[in-house]
Image: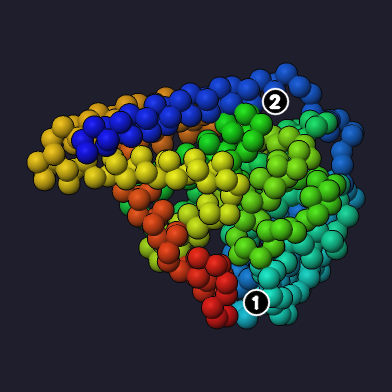
Amino acid sequence: MLIFGLTFLTLFLLGYCGALILLGKGFSNLQKTLLEESSEFSGQNLPTVSVIIAARNEERNLPRLLQHLQQLDYPQEKLEICIVDDRSSDNSVALLQAAKERMPYLKVLHVRDQIKDFAPKKRALDMAIRATHGEIILLTDADCSPPPTWIHATLACYKEESAGVIGYSPYRFDKPMPKFLQKMLSLEFFSVAAVAAASAGLGTPATAAGCNLSYRRRTYQRAKGFDGIRHWISGDDDLFILKVAEQKIGTWSYGLSPEAFVPAAAPSTWRAFWNQRIRYAGKGAHYALPFVMLLVAVYLFNVLLAVSLPALLAGFTAFAFASLLAWLVKSIFEWRFLNKVAKIYRNRDLLKYYLPTALLHPFYIVLFGFMGTFSKFTWRGDEFAITTEELNHG
């Protein structure tokens, strides 16, 4: 039994470290491509752009969002902004109607009901995409604050073969929270973005966030929109880019410039964090088989690491020390990869909090990986069963 456990631990460790080395190479490829290949859109060659946001009961966030949207640095004759009110029951509608009077390029749409087998957010986004005309679509969320430079910086990443551009959304903390907790949450969110950027550099993006995502209208049309994934509650971002990649519609780039970053509100309560992470973890089962197998391997590796301390207390010292050594090696390779990305993102201060984050990481993966498979979550006021992602009640 000991030999069996040590063998799997070694294989998982070698595979994990090998993947991090590969991701490092992918990030270097991405940097090289962005530096050496000129953008398709430069000078006066600017495309028409549609900025699209789906919002539900966002009266607290809309004033900030609208202020930032007004400050976007892009020719108004080539810009349209579309916000979809998705069954809001608060003051969102009134805020949006008032905004239309001072923003002539703002289009407001309304969703009044739900359609079976069409996830609410995907339906709202699809409605907006069909109602707009921009050559390039930029997506963000109502709790985000895109900078004035967002559009130009994102367009600078488009190459002729680009299907779209994935972006980074650093956390913005609107409510007081201990600094060490802020930094650990920010580091965890940053690490996901680092993997997204590096995997895009390898030609197969692993994930994306809908709070900062862009693609060509023809990309959406060639992929036939959300067909095939429309029934899954989440996944308007990562499942869509994976669908595009599988269909070989084009390549994905990544916005490495801070001018392309779109800050997003961090979860302000434990309940919000809990539901968000379960939702994120639950999407893994909908990936293509190779990605699912990779996620399972990463999960099992973290299970072996997480049981090292109980094993030590139970007297299985050989396995426990081997697991702790694997934990150390894993952490070293992770830090090297994250440090490489953080230099470019100008986020190296987050790495001061790497040690406590790395110590908690295996337990975090085991907990939310399990909960993301069997639990329920609440999102935008609705409750969903994670195993089917069916709406339980509105």
Residue 227 picture quarter: bottom right
Q: Residue 102 versus residue 304: which sits nearer the camera?
A: 304
The answer to whether 7 is drawn above or below residue 173 in the figure is above
The residue depicted at 55 percent of the width and 81 percent of the height is: 393
| Spot occupied by residue 228 in the image (x, y as percentages of width and height) | 71, 58
- Who comes first in sequence, dot 2 or dot 1? 2
Q: CA distance from mark 2 to mark 1?
A: 40 Å
The residue depicted at 52 percent of the width and 46 percent of the height is: 292
Q: Left or right: where does residue 36 sit relative to residue 174? A: right
Residue type at mark 1: give it. Ser
Q: Which mark is residue 34?
A: 2
The residue depicted at 87 percent of the width and 38 percent of the height is: 46
Q: Left or right: where does residue 16 sit relative to residue 309? A: right
Q: Residue 356 versus residue 377: which sits nearer the camera?
A: 377
The answer to whether 44 is drawn above or below residue 211 in the figure is above
CA neighbours of label 2 inside 10 A, class few (<14), some (14 to 19), many (20+): some
Q: Residue 5 versus residue 77: which sits nearer the camera?
A: 5
Q: Residue 212 versus residue 274: which sits nearer the camera?
A: 274
The residue depicted at 71 percent of the width and 80 percent of the height is: 113
Please indicate, yes or no, whether residue 70 appears anywhere in the rendered image. no
Residue type at mark 2: give it. Leu
Q: Which mark is residue 88?
A: 1
Please indicate, yes or no, whether residue 219 appears anywhere in the rendered image. yes
Quadrant in which the C terminus is drawn: bottom right
Count every numbered label the image shows and give the total.
2
Q: Left or right: where does residue 43 sit relative to residue 153? A: right
Residue 56 picture quarter: bottom right
| Spot occupied by residue 306 in the image (x, y as percentages of width and height) | 27, 44
The answer to whether 277 is drawn above or below residue 114 in the figure is above
